[in-house]
Amino acid sequence: MKSLDKNLAAAVKAVAKRHPNSPPTSTASLEFRDVRHQVSGTELSSTVDRLISMLSTPGPDSSGAEAAGLVRALLSIGYTATAAEYFNFSVGRLQEMNLWEVLPLIPNAACFDKWLKIAKKPVREILNELLSQPRRAYDTAAADWLCSRADAKSLAPVLDLIISRQPRPKHLPSWHEVIVTGLKKDKKGMLLRALIATAADVSTGTKTLVEVITSNRQLFKSMPEALTLILTHKQACQPAVNFVTLLLDPTLIPDCDQRETTSAILARLGTGILLAERRSQEADVVLEFIRKTSRQLRSITKGETSQSRTWVLENLHVEERQPDGRLCVNLQGARHIALAFEKVDQGFPPKEILSVTARHLGLLTIGRRDEVVAYDPLLHDDTEDGLVPGDTVVILEPGLAYNNEAVLRAKVKKNKGDSNV
């Protein structure tokens, strides 16, 4: 059906370009010859004949009601592209309709723009009228238009419907597509900021927004620029921190290729914040998150070759670089290390010596041998591959953590007694 809609729309466009005022019937019929043949004997044939007739009728003498009826008929059968081309062709016949009469007939935001221009409607007045009835606007192309035109602060009622996944008429883009299209045009990050704020007030709203963005690779890769603008803006956006931590959560990154993309995004966001002239408290929190996440990404990525693909984040590891050759331990820690050397000379088991020394230096063990726990890729090293977060696993070798961060992950394998096996 989409291919036929495309062909029909092309025929309408060709007629409109050749005869913008009053195309002869023979010319219109010629443009539609191939399409007319394809639909011969089907229910669509009467609609195509009607379309040819309307395109062959002089514009000023044709009825606006007839044009509106044909647009409505095309939308009802899902021929959105054809409806859009015919709407643009007939917009002069529809200019006298009021806003709420014409909105159900408008196929997309571009057509709405054209109607506003032809009808000479004051944009500010139209904005206020649409925002006064968000549900009615959401069920029309006005919502798509608002997301690219209106002040993002005033969009909350419409964005609430989008984030809540409310269904729309079939001929309109879905709530998911409205977000994607709007954010791709959101050069200043204003729509993203409004979406983040709205999502924070909707149950599972932030998760919904993250799912939409991560499902579109191009959109996901464009996030650093918009987020930098939001995090360094003079007006704070506190929900942005939670959004960033969920968007770039290392536990949700399944493979090395995606980790490489995520590490690059983290680096672009981090350097963007560092180069900005203004720094907010939220920006500082996100910078610390980036530093921690970069370490975690390297920790859960196996092999030197794969780990090297996160090299772009190394310049953010400020806490790992000790100036002027200073020690990474204090005097008391140095004494514990010296004591370990003495224990080696006395013949104590090396592993026992290391365990005691690690404990004295502030390292804590992660798990106990044979302990059954839920798999966490930040704490556990999957020795068999194939585990997903939450799987029941058994610890083969305990790990080590410092300040609640794993420096040596515990080795684990799938628990054979798990009922899900």
Image: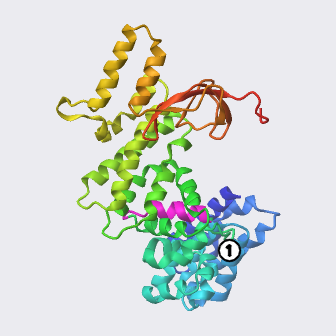
Front residue of 230/89: it is: 230
Determine the residue positioned at 37% across, 8% down: 345
What segment is highlighted magenta in the picture? 175-188
Q: Answer with the quarter of the image where residue 307 lies.
A: top left
Q: Position of residue 77 (x, y in %)?
A: 73, 68
Q: Is residue 369 magenta?
A: no
Q: Position of residue 164 (x, y in %)?
A: 62, 68
**Mark 1 residue element:** helix
Is residue 20 visible in the rendered image? The answer is: no
Front residue of 154/56: it is: 154
Determine the residue positioned at 40% across, 64% down: 189
Front residue of 119/389: it is: 389
Residue linked to disc 1: 51
Q: Main secondary structure of the magenta part?
A: helix
Give, as a three-letter code, the residue at label 1: Leu
On the picture, is 221 further left or further right than 129? left
